Amino acid sequence: MPPTLASLVHHSALKLTVRAGEDRLDVPVRWAHVSELADPVPYMEGGELLLITALKLDAEDREAMRRYVKRLAGAGVVGLGFAVGVNYDEIPGALVEAARDEGLPLLEVPRLTPFLAISKAVSAAIAADQYRSVTAGFAAQRELTKQALTGGPEGLLAALASQVDGWAALYDASGAVVATAPEWAGRRAARLTADVERLRERPAPASSVVGGHGTSDNDDRVELHSLGTGRRPRSALAVGTAAALGTAERYAVHSAIALLTLTTERSRSLQAAEQRIGAAVLRMLLAGEPEHARTVAGDLYGGLLDAPFRLIVAETVAVSSVRIAADAPTRVPSAAGLAAAADTNGDPLEALTEVVESAAARSGEAVLVVPERERLMVLAADGGAAVTACGEYAVALEAARTREQTSAGDEDELVVGVSAPVGPIAAAAAYKQAEQALSVARRRGRVYVEHEQLASGSVLPLLADDAVRAFADGLLRPLYEHDATGRGDLVASLRAWLSRHGQWDAAAADLGVHRHTLRYRMRRVEEILGRSLDDPDVRMELWLALKATTSAE
């Protein structure tokens, strides 16, 4: 610890005597400074022991001494050393009284103790304290490195919490708590999620201090540090202590930041190599070679192929091509999904990659992510955290898009298609399912569609396509033109007849006409269109055309 007034008083070679402020001797001394100025305050930084002989002071003037001592205390001077036997044989009573009133420690320096000896003692104590801090910092670094190698991030956090006599927490890229030490700090760390998210918005490396001002629970002083070497931090470290960190503790924190960065931020070459392996595994699965894929996957992705998985295909589409679907989900997205959706600074596919990988890392499950040109392909365990996080993220985006109804700017929007659960042998079928779901998502203006949803509901929303509507308009145009002349209501008659499955009496009753009139109208439909209504394909096309034009209206 740094030198204090008490340690100087107990220094046998200095022979200092306390004349005032006996109860404030435990204050640290930053430096010992000699000044005979009547007002040395402009040259003080705070924390100094000021040494004087009162060469230019009227030390017997009570009012002058009161003002002098008050200014020293206000400037942060921690003590006043008065040399006796130089200008005064003893410390004047006015100065002693002023020091006692202000609570400023006053030390009597004997004639045989030069100020230089006091300065050397303070300097030596400061140097020794710094040496101890550096030594302790190196020892902490060794211990943290050992824990990082043997116990991973959890072991490192435990060692760091012990070094700073506080607690530590690790957050992932989404701001979720990954690990804490000690365990009781989990709830406290979770309350800092919003602060971690704000930290992520700043370029790395970034840090901030929260709490420590009597406003937070237990009055913790918490330092937040971003981790990572890229433009956007991949994770964050929180360190909570009762007071500001000392030099040794600061060394420990900086060491932990470096080690956690190495632990959580894989090298670009390693990441690229794993990505190439993942791409090779996916190609083999799609080529119908599951056993070869399992061999190549090894321990890296092998576990992913031992249980049903889903194939996710995502891409971006221009904002102008995205329509807000009327049947978009209205359920409230989770907090994790909202947090991810709020981050719109990066590429949508990169954001989705971060969400999926972070969720998989938190749950300890394997996930295969392969960027492919302008799209992203993901192989993830069915029912796992990665698939769930993908769905929550998409729902959050869709909810935000539905609220706004229009998208600001020219940024591309995310579209995701998800296959049904399959095994390795059916990977090719899963890819086709994901492609179909992706196509439907584009057509319906949805962000996220699972293949199981394609068989639910009605086929009619699929008709909401410009090409289908154009076909329907072209097919029915002659009938509409005929009806416009007032020579009969062929379109309504055709709709009624088809809806009654060709039952003449029931359809005629719906129209309020005689069945012979309806038969005549249907012959006119055949003549105008040049098609036979006895053909089931013709009836199907006409019915779908009628539904498509009705939905367009």
Image (cartoon, grey):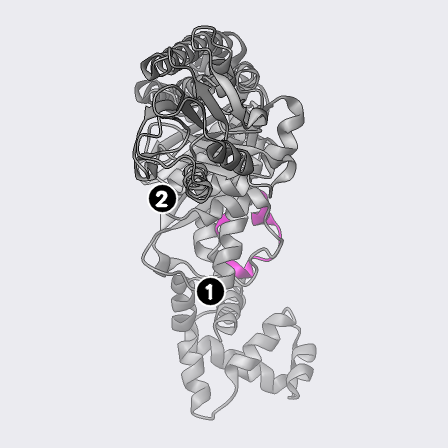
Q: Amino acid at mark 2?
A: Gly
> Which disc number belongs to residue 405?
1
- In the depicted view, which residue is nearer to us: 203 or 393? 203
Residue 286, percent across and down? 42, 27
Q: Give the residue drawn at x 35%, y 43%.
A: 347
Which of pointers 2 and 1 lies earlier in the amino acid sequence? 2
Question: How many C-alpha atoms fall within 10 Å of the one at disc 1: few (<14), some, or many (≥20)?
Answer: few
Q: Amino acid at mark 1?
A: Gln
* Left or right: 70 in relation to 187: left
Q: Give the residue drawn at x 32%, y 36%.
A: 40
Q: Please give the residue where the numbered disc 2 appears in the rendered image.
A: 346
- In the depicted view, which residue is nearer to us: 89 or 362? 89
| Highlighted range, magenta | 447-462
Q: Give the residue drawn at x 50%, y 41%.
A: 195
Residue 3 is covered by the magenta coloring: no
Q: Nearer the viewer, mark 2 or mark 1?
A: 2
Please, is residue 468 above or below residue 246 in the view? below
Residue 461 is covered by the magenta coloring: yes
Residue 304, percent across and down? 53, 21
Q: Is residue 71 visible?
A: yes
Q: Is residue 433 visible?
A: no
